[in-house]
Structure formats: structure tokens, C-alpha cells
Amino acid sequence: MSERYLLDRWYQAAFSEEVGDTPLARTLLDIPVVLYRAGDAIAALEDRCPHRFAPLSMGSVRDGAVVCGYHGLAFGADGACKHNPHGKITAAMRVRAFPVVERHTVVWIWMGEALKADAALIPDLGFIDRTPETARIRFHIPTSANYRLVTDNLMDLSHADYLHPTSLGGVMTGAEVTTSLKGETVVTQWINRDCLAPARFHARVPPPQRADAWTEAVWQAPAVMVISTSLVPTGTQRRDEDEVRALHSMTPETASTTHYFVCGTRGDRLEDVEYSERLRGMLANAFIHEDKPMLEAQQARLGNASFEGSRPVLLAIDAGAVQVRRQLDRRIAAEQDAALALA
Ligand code: FES
Ligand SMILES: [Fe+2]
């Protein structure tokens, strides 16, 4: 199965905490990449030595360069060879270097044309910076499913009522749902008044007390989403500290596998580490033991067939997901048309 990706956009390569001074191997958009810290910056190089094609990630990092573990060629963050223990350095001794920016505790990588890399296109995730580390909950979930299936899963949160009944579900079916295009984003909102809070929010509105719930999923290309939820006792005002926001970021590894990253934040009990751990357990169960197996089983059923070619039945709940697929297709086609025009 081959996949055409949107190239001139930032993808999440990793969380900051994952990248250190030992090489991290990660395949992104079918390309093997090695990441490591080089001084204050993060280097991202093609993970294939130009000599005998050994993965550079099997080597080590020394003085800001990655040293091939096979015969010792060393490559700097710009991809150029810095040291050849066997003779002269030639121009052919280089690997592709990818632009990288570290922002909002995320390592962003640009897999397209390096000259077009524009840090202003990185999504604004200031809510992560404003949340103390004690209230951030991160996951990197390697998932054997196409990244668009993972996006579908989040643009249609009605699945929570069926797949996550003991944690996140219970307020989506029957909610007032709207989907709209706002600038470069697709936004789906669910509003449910006078409902029973899902277990995730029992600390805020314990049953049988009634609750009003707002959920908003905002997508931007290629596959970065922010999901915000606010749940308050019925009839009361929403407060800032009621907002629960999470980054969900889907980076294709291959056509049928995805690096699914999540960073959850909250506005209350910010220093409560024990509460964070309880939430982490609940969310891990939902994302890793409920979403992931379902997504992987969907992909297995699809096999190598294309999603559209398999003629999925369309339901009213698919409005957001369909809009996202359309937007993505449009941008990929535009990028490819522009490339052909230049060729
Ligand atoms: S394969 Fe890397 S130096 Fe030989
Ligand atoms: Fe889910």
C-alpha cells in the first residue's frame, strides 16, 4: 500500500523528553530518521549511512555528530561528514538533514523541501506550556493503522460511548453536534446539557448530579488535533480551570502504521501528582487498550485496500472526519500540482 503524504508541513517526530544524547531511530513518512541532541539543538538525519547503508542510529553521538557504528564516519547536524577515520572527506559523504524545531515540549520535523520550512506554521499549543509538568500526561502509542483512521477516531467522538463506557463515554450520542471550517482548521463541537458525567469527570460532577458538557475537536493539517472538554454542574458557568485540553498528533510511520502522540493537560489540581497518576491509568486504558486494538483491527480488515475504494458507509456522525479527509486530500493534490508545475 503506498501513500502520498502532505510534505510541506510540520509533523511531530517525538516529545522533547524522548530525544537525548543517544540516537533515537524513528521512521516518519516511510523515511528512516535518526534524532539526537546536538548542543542546544536537535538534529534529525536520514538514518542510513552513505557508505554501506548501516543505520546511523546503531552508532553513537560524539561532539554533536552521530558516528556510524560500522566504520566510524561521523555526520553533523547539517548532514555533512565531519570525520572520516580512513582518509579524506568527500562531498558524497553526506546524509539528508531535516529541519527541526522544538516547541511546546514537542519535536517538530519538516519532511518536505527544507527551504520552505517556516516555524510560523507550527500549531499554537501554548496550553501545554502554561500547564505545569505535574499536570501533563503524555503518551507515544505506536499504532498499526493508517494515520487517517486515527484522525477519524478523534473527529468522531461518538465512539467514546461504545468503546470507552467506563472512562470517557456517555455524553456523545444525542449531543448537539456541529462541524465547521474555521480558516485552516476543521472544528467539531459536541454539546450535551443535563447529562451524567463520564467517569473521567466524576471528581468534578459526581453522579447523580447532572452535568453540562462541551467538547471541541480542532484539526489542522497534516494531523494535529487539540481536543478540549469542559464539564460543569448543570446550569453553572464554565470556568477556565474546568477546561481539559489535549494534543493528539498523528504522524504517519508508514502507510499502515502511525506514531500516535497524546499530551493531556488540565486546569485543576495542577500539583496533584497522585491524581495525575490515576488519570494516566484511566487514559492509558482508553487509548492503549481500547482505541489502539480497534484501530489496528480496522486496518487489518481493510488490509491493503484503500479506504475510499472500500466504499465506507456514511453516517451523520462522520461529518467532521469526512471534512478532514477532504481538506487533507485537497492540500496534498495542491502540493503535488505545484511540484509538477515546477518539474
Ligand atoms: S556503513 Fe557507515 S561508515 Fe561504513
Ligand atoms: Fe477513543
Image (cartoon, rainbow, N blue to C red):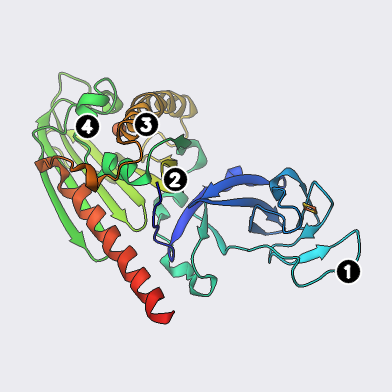
Lower sequence index among marks 1 and 3: 1
Q: Amino acid at mark 4?
A: His
Q: Amino acid at mark 2?
A: Thr
Q: Secondary structure at mark 2?
A: loop
Q: Amino acid at mark 1?
A: Lys
Residue at 33% x, 48% y: name it: 226
Lower sequence index among marks 1 and 2: 1
Q: Whole-Å distance between the Cαs marked 2 and 3?
A: 32 Å
Q: Which of the numbered marks, if any, corresponds to residue 131?
A: 2
Find ligand 2 in the image and state its quadrant. Answer: top left
Residue at 34% x, 58% y: name it: 221
Residue 227 placement (x, y as % from top left): 30, 45
Q: Secondary structure at mark 3?
A: helix
Q: Secondary structure at mark 1?
A: loop
Q: Whole-Å distance between the Cαs marked 4 and 2?
A: 28 Å
Would residue 318 appear left or right of 337 to someone viewing this image?
Answer: left
Q: Whole-Å distance between the Cαs marked 4 and 1?
A: 60 Å
10 Å crowding of disc 1: few (<14), some (14-19), many (20+): few
Whether residue 340 appears in this view of the structure is: yes
Q: Nearer the viewer, mark 1 or mark 2?
A: 1
Whether residue 105 appears in this view of the structure is: no
